[in-house]
Image: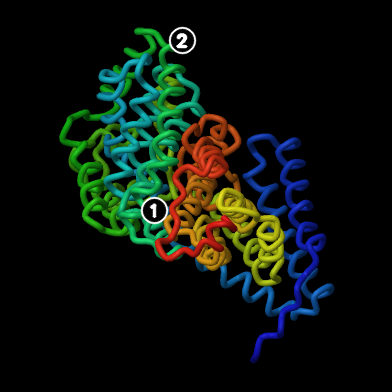
Amino acid sequence: MEHQQQPTPSLRLALFPCVLLIAGIVLNVYLFKDAASSGPNQIALLLSGIFVALLGHVFLGLRYREIETRAIKSIVLAMEAILILMVVGCLIGLWILSGIVPTMIYYGIQILTPVVFLPLVCLVCSIVSLAVGSSWSTMGTVGIALLGIGRVLGFPDPLVAGAIISGAYFGDKMSPLSDTTNLASGIAGSQLFVHIRHMFYTTIPSYTIAMILFAAISLFYRPGEYNDASVNEILTGIELNFFVHWSLLLVPLLVIILAAKGMPALPALTLGALLGAGVALLWQPLRFMSETGVIMTGPERYGMIIMTAYNGFRLDSGRDSLDSLLSQGGLSGMYDTVALILSAMFFGGAMEATGLMRRIAGAILHHVRGAGSLISATVGSTILVNIFLAEQYLAIVLTGRMYRTEYQNRGLDARNLSRALEDGGTLTSVLVPWNTCGAFAASVLGISTLSYLPFCFFNLASPVVAIILAAMHIGIKTLATATPEQLSES
């Protein structure tokens, strides 16, 4: 069946569902606070997606069934993210059961001190993410342990999460192994390492700002709950409930090495979860004793491992602080996030299928007057796509396609476009609660997106720095073949 020739919607029609969605989300946050993403936002996104499809049918004459089909097909883009999210849920539960996460927390508490904690968290996550090329793998492994250490040291969870995410996304943006880094350079038509070098213009100032802020907070912040007694209580509790040994750290190290060698995230994390189950059987025999003190049978141990992977690990030590710290994970705990991703992708797919998102981007492009405003418009468009289409890949791909010809017409090198796609698309995705990245981070770290958002200093600074430098015409590369007429337009 041939597709209908799609009419061009009015800007008012294109903006109407966006305004409606934002109003619904704001109302949900006001009424439900942190619980807004545990049901209310899913409903708002699903209803908004159906509403967009009906708008396309009634006002644009498009077939409702075709819009719905194309919107559902867009969900395929998020399936890898959903599978990774489910595996990470299993991994967290099994890594706590095996003593891996408790060991990381145990040693981390003794090495890290409050005065340097936040910048070191950002730095460690930067190095790991740079090596593996994945912010998700970084947050789901070392990020969990660092969050636990921060809690013991008395730092608020959202603040520590901001440092974890800032570091994780620095590596995700700058690593040649990162899928978004390769995608942005490919869509824009720039060479990978040329693209990475060009990002130094915006990345170095943004990262410096973030590190200064984290260092200042660590230096002057006095955690109210931090004292030797509380720390010793956690350390003693870990020793009583888990076997702690440095060799347990070989499992996360192996996962990082495999990812750095190019193994995709899904099999690498799955292997990490399976190794966690094996380590639990070998090194944590106390975890496999019944209430009467009898060692569990083989089938009983298998059942415990499976249910820990599914429902997460639950500790009942009698120490509230330790129990809350180490009772996490599980595939079932990811269901709210899976529903959020599915409903958000349906809404974004409907916006794309009806042409409403392209109409909004076209209106932005109409007001572009020079190179600086073109780069700013690119950054702004990726942020809008992250909000309304809920997927960083779409933010990079759609914006890159829409603006690539305009950069060529103005005699601007493709590296300008690829950098803008990353400054806006990659880094702001984790700041949107219903975006796949924001939903993943909130679910894995156990902190709502709006709570950690103010402390993601690197992610917040990057698009602002990109726009300021563009306005000052700093770091803008022109094509060697650009004509004087093209350069005058820029």
Side (left or right) of 149 relative to 373: left
User: Relative to the observer, which residue lies in front, 117 or 83?
Assistant: 117
Q: Secondary structure at mark 2?
A: loop
Residue shown at 41% from the left, 29% from the top: 208
Q: Which mark is first along the chain, 2 or 1?
A: 1
How far from the left and from the top, in percent, is residue 106? 28, 24
Q: Which residue is at 60% across, 70% downward?
A: 72
Viewport quadrant of the C terminus: bottom right
Horizontal relation, residue 357 to residue 329: left or right: right
* Image location (x, y in percent) of residue 266: 34, 58
Q: Vertical placement of 215 versus 333: above or below?
A: above
Q: Residues within 10 Å of mark 1 (few under 14, many from 20)?
A: many
* In this view, the mark in front (1 or 2): 2
**Does residue 4 show up?**
yes
Q: Quadrant of residue 9?
A: bottom right
Q: Is residue 443 left or right of residue 319?
A: right
Q: Amino acid type of disc 2? A: Arg
Residue that numbered label 2 is attached to: 222
Image quadrant holding the N terminus, namely bottom right
Tell me the quarter of the picture where residue 69 sits. bottom right
Q: Is the C-beta separation of discs 1 and 2 under 8 Å? A: no
Circle 1 SS class = helix
The residue that disc 1 covers is: 87
View extreme (top): residue:
228
Q: Mark 1: which amino acid?
A: Val
- Residue 455 in percent (x, y) is at 52, 30
